[in-house]
Image: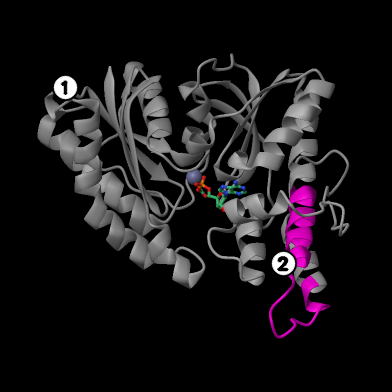
Amino acid sequence: MRVLAIETSCDDTGAAVILDGRKILSNIVSSQVPIHRKYGGVVPELASRKHIESIVPIVAEALDTAKVTLKEIDGIAVTQGPGLVGSLLVGLSFAKSIAFARGLPFIGVNHIEAHLSAIFLGEKPPRFPFIGLVVSGGHTSLFRMDGFGKYRRLGQTRDDAAGEAFDKVAKLLGLGYPGGPIIDELSKTGNPKAVRFPRPVLSKNSLDFSFSGLKTAVVNYVKAYPEPPGGYPEDLIKDIVSSFQEAAVEVLVKKTVQAAQCQGLKRIVLSGGVAANQRLRQKIREESFEQKLKVYLPSPSFCTDNAAMVGVVGYEYLKRGIRSPYSLNAFSNLPL
Ligand code: KG4
Ligand code: ZN
């Protein structure tokens, strides 16, 4: 089955053609970073307008690259939420229109479920059940996954998402947007032990996260050093971001491993934009090795937003005969 998948939940316009839920025939992502960069974050109104401009050429490019026409597509999958509602509506309305015009089966997909399923695009996907960590700009949650559609949330952030904390710290230090990849790069030559920022673990047994205290600790640390006329010395910046990253990564790894141990599961899957972070990938590998757990990491381009992962989930539902109605709406807070 060939599924045309569409993703417009935030600031990336994505379209992909996926064969049997696993093989990528095309996967096109058009990033809006240059538009939002000067504002230091995503401006929802600008994002939805840009999706309107991009959706037709991006879907056409996905079909061309896959060397198929709409006649050879068997179903349409599209992100229904969570995300920015104006952005979601562009992809959803477009997907519904194609499905209706061509009489194709159509399914709305949860964006978090799509992130958790990106791992099935890799060479050796995991067997169920496993622990899934979604760690992105909008979400930081731990799930027990027993199959497609069979999820139990074990914990989530009580305030900021991890990616949001990366982005806010980078903004505070004037490093640019999006902050995650910039901090990832700068941290490589910084000292992660330079500043002992707090590791918010909440209570001992809790699998919830909290990143706003860590972010505030960075703000307070920086405020204690009035900015010199030429800006903060580069080495100081590198030490601060590296120490911040180390604290965030340590908490993410600790709780993910704890979740596996509590549930008696041996497999861990990471997903979402922050799962592209090199220190997080290294640390979860090391810790999993020590704890005799097996960790599965999607390649970095499948961690950040893309339509291929939407195609994986869409296929799983469409092949079971599950369809969405044409009245389907977009929801900014769609739960999983
Ligand atoms: O999954 P995603 O593309 O969109 C959401 O669903 O939110 O994630 C975007 C988030 C941003 O906060 C970005 O700064 C962060 O993922 N991110 C990273 C890295 N690459 C992207 N954070 C840390 N290290 C990275 N290498
Ligand atoms: Zn995402």
Q: What residue is pinned by disc 2? A: 234
Q: Residues within 10 Å of mark 2 (few under 14, many from 20)?
A: few
Does the magenta-highlighted stretch encompass residue 237? yes
> Who's the residue at 59% across and 58% down the image?
179
290 lies left or right of 179: right
- Residue 146 picture location, percent across and down: 59, 20
What's the magenta region?
222-248
Under mark 1, the amino acid is Glu
Disc on the earlier residue, 2 or 1: 1
Tell me how far mark 2 sits from mark 1, CA to CA: 54 Å
| Front residue (pair 34, 302) | 34
| Rendered view: 113 above or below 223 | above
Q: Secondary structure at mark 1?
A: helix
Does the magenta-highlighted stretch encompass residue 36? no
- Residue 207 picture location, percent across and down: 76, 40
| Rendered view: 168 above or below 330 | below
> Who's the residue at 41% across and 39% down the image?
306
Residue 135 visible within the image: yes
- Residue 69 picture location, percent across and down: 14, 28
